[in-house]
Image: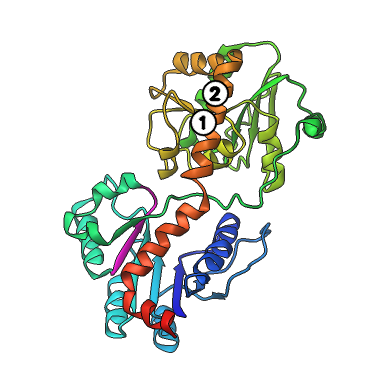
């Protein structure tokens, strides 16, 4: 087996636990043995840890110690531009450990010095794994042949969507009485432009339509939002979040969409957002096919697109099917795992061939 060490900076979020468990089993089929080191696992996790995991303080001394003591064949870094990374990469080279970086890597706007450091890291790397194809354009031409794409997504393989017959139970549980619903799910933050959504909902003024706001609001953004047909749910996770999506019709976060689009599309909800800076997962949204992107701050257009999807059942169904198809294919976790496998095979072909023959 080829020993692979994944270094995760910070605590591992609950959704990543589920991803790493799947990735570990996937790579085992190809003779790669994955182990993870991190600064712990997020409290109140919803998933069992099904991968070898070690908790350490992610710094130069601890990383140097674990590299020297365990001598992995390959190390994958999910670590940003930390000051200790260049020395650690040089140490890995001395130890003949292959190195892979995973994440956004270079994306605008980066000052010149950051770009210089990124490119030096890329030069030292044996492979680079990016969250989406969109980030490839930020990688120098000379590094393209060792750059691979692992579409950032969630592990949907154990998801269960609430059946139609149980939807009234879910609505009753949360006190939702509206016939059709727009939902916004995730941490309630200023960068997500929730104010635009609330304004749009007020202008929409459609009888029987509700707005579900599900997520922790630590900044009190919604403290003065008490309109009729607006349901402030608070934080929901796991199956509860899927149940709320199942009783909704359209998903809307005007700003900074991230992995929440994966859940929304999996449940067949068209997505409406604004043309702002989003996470890499915005790649799944095809404007006019499975959702809409409206100009930044254009509340009138936001209202128009929400109303169109709520009133045109055939269009909404078409978008729903397109959303499911997109996430069941490009957003399936196997696509992500394929990117890791390709990068590992590129980084350690001699090690992999040797271990396969054994």
Distance between the Cα atoms at labels 1 and 2? 6 Å
- What residue is disc 2 on? 318
Which picture quadrant has residue 162?
top right
- Which disc number belongs to residue 60? none
Nearer the observer, 216 or 267:
267
Residue at 46% from the left image edge and 33% from the top image edge: 255
Q: Which color scheme does this rendered protein use?
A: rainbow
Residue at 30% from the left image edge and 65% from the top image edge: 127
Nearer the observer, 222 or 85:
85
Residue at 32% from the left image edge and 71% from the top image edge: 347
Q: Residues within 10 Å of mark 2 (few under 14, many from 20)?
A: some
Does the image show residue 259? no
From the viewer's perspective, is residue 200 above or below residue 70?
Answer: above
- What residue is disc 1 on? 322
Q: Residues within 10 Å of mark 1 (few under 14, many from 20)?
A: many
Residue 274 lies in the magenta stretch: no
Mark 1–mark 2 CB contact (< 8 Å): yes
Report helix, strand or loop for mark 1.
helix
Nearer the observer, 189 or 78:
78
Residue 85 in picture, x, y percent from top left: 32, 70
Residue at 68% from the left image edge and 57% from the top image edge: 46
Report helix, strand or loop for mark 2.
helix
Residue 128 lies in the magenta stretch: yes
From the viewer's perspective, is residue 236 above or below residue 98?
Answer: above
**Left or right: where does residue 358 sit relative to residue 115?**
right
Q: Quadrant of the C terminus?
A: bottom left
Magenta residues span: 126-132
Residue 172 in picture, x, y percent from top left: 82, 30
């Amino acid at each position: 087996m080829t020993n692979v060490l994944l270094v995760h900076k910070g605590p591992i979020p609950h959704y990543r636990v589920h991803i790493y468990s799947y990735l570990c089993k996937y790579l085992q089929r190809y003779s790669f043995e994955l182990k993870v080191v991190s600064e712990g696992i997020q409290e109140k996790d919803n998933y069992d840890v099904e991968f070898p995991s070690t908790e350490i303080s992610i710094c130069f001394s601890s990383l140097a110690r674990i590299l020297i003591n365990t001598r992995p064949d390959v190390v994958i870094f999910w670590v940003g531009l930390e000051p200790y990374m260049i020395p650690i990469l040089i140490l890995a080279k001395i130890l003949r450990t292959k190195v892979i970086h995973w994440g956004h890597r270079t994306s605008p706007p980066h000052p010149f010095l950051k770009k210089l450091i990124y490119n030096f890291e890329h030069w030292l790397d044996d492979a680079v794994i990016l969250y989406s194809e969109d980030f490839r354009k930020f990688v120098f031409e000379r590094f393209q042949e060792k750059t691979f794409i692992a579409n950032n997504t969630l592990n949907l393989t154990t998801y269960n969507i609430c059946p139609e017959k149980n939807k009234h139970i879910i609505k009753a549980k949360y006190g939702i009485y509206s016939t059709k619903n727009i939902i916004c799910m995730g941490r309630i933050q200023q960068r997500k432009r929730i104010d635009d959504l609330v304004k749009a909902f007020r202008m929409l003024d459609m009888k029987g339509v509700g707005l579900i706001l599900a997520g922790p609001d630590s900044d009190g953004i919604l403290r003065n939002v008490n309109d009729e047909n607006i349901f402030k749910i608070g934080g929901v996770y796991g199956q509860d979040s899927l149940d709320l999506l199942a009783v909704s019709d359209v998903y809307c976060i005007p700003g900074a969409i991230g992995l929440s689009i994966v859940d929304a599309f999996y449940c067949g909800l068209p997505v409406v957002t604004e043309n702002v800076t989003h996470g890499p997962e915005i790649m799944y949204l095809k404007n006019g096919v499975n959702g809409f992107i409206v100009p930044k701050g254009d509340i009138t257009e936001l209202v128009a697109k929400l109303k169109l999807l709520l009133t045109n059942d055939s269009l909404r169904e078409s978008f729903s099917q397109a959303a499911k198809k997109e996430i069941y294919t490009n957003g399936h976790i196997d696509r992500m795992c394929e990117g890791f496998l390709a990068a590992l095979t590129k980084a350690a072909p001699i090690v992999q061939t040797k271990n396969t023959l054994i």
